[in-house]
Image (tube, rainbow, N blue to C red):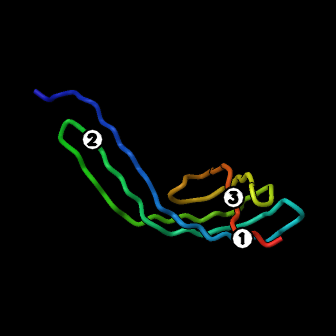
Amino acid sequence: HEYAGTYSYHNYALLPIVRFAWVRRGIVQLYSGLGFGLAFSHSDSPKGRDYNVDSSFDFTFIGISVGRDLFGYFDISGGSRGVISFGIGYRFLNKK
C-alpha cells in the first residue's frame, strides 16, 4: 500500500547575464544577452528530501528595455529563465 502525499519542488538560480545593446535610441534599447551560473533546487516528497546543484545557462535572442537608470524590460530567451521574461531593473554606473 503506497502513501499518497504532497510533492513540492523549488528552483533558484544565480545567473549573471551580460547584455549587448545593438540599438540605443533615447531611453529605448534593443539587446541580446548571454548568462551562465548555478541553479539550486530542492524537492520534498513522501520519499524524503532531495537537494541538487547544477549549472544554469540562458541566451536572450532579443529584448527591449525602456528607461535610463530605472528601466522595464521584456525579452525572448531560451534556457533557465524560460521563453519570455519581463521585469524592472536598475543600472548602476550608467553611462549617460
**Foreground label between 3 and 2:** 3
Q: Position of residue 36 (x, y in %)?
A: 50, 69
- Identify the mark nearer the N-term, 1 or 2: 2
Label 1, label 2: how far apart the Cα atoms are: 42 Å
Tag shown at residue 45: none
**Foreground label between 1 and 2:** 1
Residue that badge 3 annotates: 90
Q: For the C terminus, give its image quadrant.
A: bottom right
Residue at disc 3, secondary structure = strand
* Cβ–Cβ under 8 Å for marks 3 and 2: no
Taking the image as shown, residue 65 lies to the left or right of residue 35, namely right
Q: Quadrant of residue 33?
A: bottom right
Residue under the point 83% across and 69% down? 23
Tag shown at residue 93: 1
Q: For the N terminus, give its image quadrant.
A: top left
Q: In the rendered image of this protein, does residue 93 appear above or below residue 14? A: below
Q: Amino acid at mark 3?
A: Tyr
Taking the image as shown, residue 58 lies to the left or right of residue 39, namely right
- Identify the mark nearer the N-term, 3 or 2: 2
Q: Position of residue 27 (x, y in %)?
A: 85, 60
